[in-house]
Image (cartoon, coloured by chain):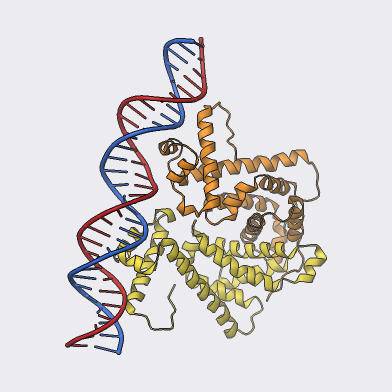
Chain colours: A orange, B yellow, C blue, D red
DNA sequence: AGACTTTTTTTACAACGTGTCGGATAATCA
DNA sequence: TGATTATCCGACACGTTGTAAAAAAAGTCT
């Protein structure tokens, strides 16, 4: 996860923040979130503990800001893909997202796959809610007697959860394949039994 | 969430644990999980802090045990419903689950709806994975070129997430209605656009 | 290069949370 | 009632937190 800023920032703060973020990700790979302290993060980052507080109020604040950055990167990853591949059969936006996640697998495995880190889940959920909301065809829902909000809950949760499982299982399928699977799943047929 | 035990337990430990669990739920309603300390739990429960450690190793351990109890209660809630209502059109097991959640709304709102508490999410996910795994019709998946594990990820995540949103939004629909919605959603028609 | 600015480091501090003693007190059991 | 068990109380060592002031280091600018 890189930091994208317009105004030139002192390379020292850039370096420090990157070291801190890398350290946090490393620690999340190694231990449960509640075992992670400012002390550990700073030590791992070879940064003085006091310096941490010059950048973040606390660990929660640090994660909030990282989640913000994640959202921005995802947005750009999704829109960029649309510009490149004008056509593609399946959902191009989704493909862009999946490729972005695959490219940053280490990061996403930690913040999505491992337990904890609900902030990141929330942000991702918001993204999917928006996306699903646009894709939902309201008239078809009414015909079938399905509430729109329920359909949005359903679709966004399915998307987020499927991707989470995909990441958790070390991405056994390519982004292209998974995007295709989504297309099939959302196109729907009878594939679940009622009981 | 009650404690169900066979061997007769000293009423004092029963009382203490119940007070501690109630206190935890109360605190979760009031503040972020990371602000909750053993100190606060004990004080709120009008229990000595040392006594806490006579029952749980730490807060995480307490939540783990509460999650275990939750799983047991959900299991019984689902199987009981099957015995009562032999038939019911929609998914009876699911209906039993939703009614159980509605009956313990305060608890589930806190552990599912609010941020944090990934343990409970994990346990619930496991339950749904099992349930979906049984309900999946494999031959239909093969016909459509859908991987079974992907379908299970998708279905269980959709279920868990929909219920979570339902709880988060203070259950605007009755368990019966939501169960019906699930039936419709899993029966599927075209209701999402690909792009 | 040197002067100026900003960041990082160092050391220190008080407040709080954690987990664990041993012994006193109170509730439960038989 | 006497024995057992749970809870309470005071206390301890240790780690974490967040903040402060001043020195040292790194970056910026002309």
Picture quarter with the N terminus of chain A: top right
Q: Nearer the viewer, residue B161 or B64?
A: B64
Q: Is residue B180 visible?
A: no
**Quadrant in the picture for residue A183:** bottom right
Q: How many numbered callouts?
A: 0
Q: In this view, does A52 lie to the left or right of A161?
A: left
Q: Which of A104 and B188 is in front in this view?
A: A104
Q: Where is residue A78 in the image (x, y as percent from the top left)?
A: 69, 43
Q: Which of B122 and B51 is in front in this view?
A: B51
Up the image or down, C3 lies above or below C10; here it is above
Q: Position of residue A111 (x, y in %)?
A: 57, 50
Up the image or down, A156 lies above or below B156; here it is above
Q: Is residue B184 left or right of residue B47?
A: right
Q: Nearer the viewer, residue A111 or A151?
A: A111
Picture quarter with the C terminus of chain A: bottom right
The residue shown at (61%, 51%) is A109
Q: Is residue A108 visible?
A: yes
Q: Is residue B77 left or right of residue A98?
A: left
Q: Position of residue B170 (x, y in %)?
A: 50, 63
Q: Where is residue A148 in the image (x, y as percent from the top left)?
A: 64, 59
The residue shown at (53%, 52%) is A30
**Quadrant in the picture for residue A158:** bottom right
**Quadrant in the picture for residue C13:** top left
């Amino acid at each position: 996860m890189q930091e994208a800023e317009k105004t030139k920032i002192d390379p020292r703060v850039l370096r420090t923040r990157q070291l801190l973020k890398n350290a946090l990700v490393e620690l999340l790979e190694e231990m449960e979130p509640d075992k992670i302290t400012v002390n550990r993060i700073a030590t791992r980052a070879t940064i003085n503990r006091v310096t941490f507080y010059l950048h973040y109020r606390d660990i929660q604040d640090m994660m909030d800001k990282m989640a913000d950055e994640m959202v921005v990167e995802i947005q750009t990853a999704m829109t960029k893909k649309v510009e490149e591949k004008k056509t593609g059969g399946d959902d191009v936006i989704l493909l862009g997202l999946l490729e972005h996640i695959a490219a940053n697998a280490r990061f996403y495995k930690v913040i999505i796959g491992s337990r904890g880190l609900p902030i990141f889940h929330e942000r991702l959920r918001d993204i999917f809610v928006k996306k699903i909301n646009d894709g939902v065809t309201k008239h078809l829902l009414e015909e079938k007697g399905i509430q729109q909000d329920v359909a949005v809950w359903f679709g966004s949760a399915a998307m987020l959860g499927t991707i989470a499982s995909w990441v958790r299982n070390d991405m056994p399928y390519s982004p292209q394949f998974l995007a295709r699977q989504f297309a099939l799943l959302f196109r729907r047929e009878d594939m679940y039994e009622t009981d």
